[in-house]
Amino acid sequence: MRIVVALGGNALLHRGERPDAAVQQANVDRVATALAALAHDHELVITHGNGPQIGLLAVESAADPALSAPYPLHLLGAQTQGMIGSLLARTLHDALPGRRIAALVTHTLVRTDDPAFEHPTKFVGQIHGEDTAQALARHRGRPMARDGKGRRRVVPSPVPERVVETDTIHELLGAGVLVICAGGGGVPVTADRDTGALTGVEAVVDKDLTAALLAEHLKADFLLILTDVPCVYEGYGSPDQRPLLDATPAQLRRGGFPDGSMGPKAEAAARFVERTGALAAIGALDAAYEIVHGRSGTLVRPDLTVV
């Protein structure tokens, strides 16, 4: 079975953790353990988030006195793909002796007229207190939005249209390679109408939506979205919270999940199932094997209509 795995950014750096390389390596060791069992039996494509990492690089770039201007987000996204891809590839290499593994820097095509460029909503970077957030917004022109008890930077998140390297990924899979790609949703680019030339844009594409699109174009059998909760919860955090273990796309969309957390995951799963008729699931990283085999997580399946 061909499975596209979407790792949440929290798989590599948990809330409140120091963004040290050693911390991220320890978390990647846990990822490799969770995915190794699946990789023995199935064909895997692994995608990953990059919110904390790209935010850290953006802060460092903005503060570097050697630069006349900070690096744009699309180049910082490429840097995170290389860093996280290397961590994952090396760790999976050790966990899966003899398996061919490739980490690929990929680009995601977006539209120049996407309304997201006028309405930034995608969280990147660390959580700041109110005073720090106001200072960043005032002195650096960074839009900030509430995330839990603090505020984080928000950037445009246009809808992914196509992963430019999809054909290359397909060829690698055909050669038996485990592919790590589309990190952070891919490097966002636009294409010239006449020449097709690619230009990087100041944005971050949602990695779950990119994973769903990639899974569709690769004709995957299963989209597995891994996060830090065991399943989708209706009324999450309220006294009426209850697990949603089985859902159709329509049922999932009626949940009204927040944009900053479960919302994009639910939408990605719904889109993939609607467009392909295949299965998707959302659940905890450590239960990856159990989720695919129907023993954990939230299964998202096509609506069975009675004729």
Image (tube, helix red, strand yellow):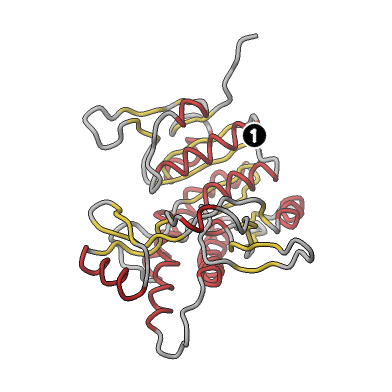
* Residue 255 image position (x, y, % from top left): 40, 31
* Residue 144 image position (x, y, % from top left): 33, 61
Q: Residue furthest right?
A: 194
Q: Nearer the viewer, residue 166 or 59?
A: 59
- 305 relative to 257, above or below: above
Category of crowding for the residue at label 1, using alpha-carbon neighbours closer than 10 angstroms: few (below 14), some (14–19), many (at least 20): few
Q: Is residue 77 left or right of residue 128?
A: right
- 52 relative to 214, above or below: below
Query: Residue at the location (55% across, 65% down)?
Result: 81
Mark yes or no: residue 5 visible. yes
At label 1, the amino acid type is: Arg
Q: Is residue 180 left or right of residue 267?
A: right
Query: Residue at the location (37% across, 68% down)?
Result: 142
Q: Nearer the viewer, residue 199 or 304?
A: 199
- 175 relative to 239, above or below: below
Q: Quadrant of the C terminus?
A: top right
| Number of numbered markers | 1
Q: Residue furthest bottom?
A: 66
Q: Residue furthest top?
A: 307
- The secondary structure type at the circle numbered 1 is helix
Residue labelled with disc 1: 275
Residue 120 occupies which quadrant of the picture? bottom left
Query: Residue at the location (64% across, 29% down)?
Result: 277
* Residue 126 image position (x, y, % from top left): 33, 64
Mark yes or no: residue 86 visible. no
- 299 relative to 31, above or below: above
* Residue 180 image position (x, y, % from top left): 60, 57
Query: Residue at the location (52% across, 66% down)?
Result: 202
Q: Is residue 214 left or right of residue 254?
A: right
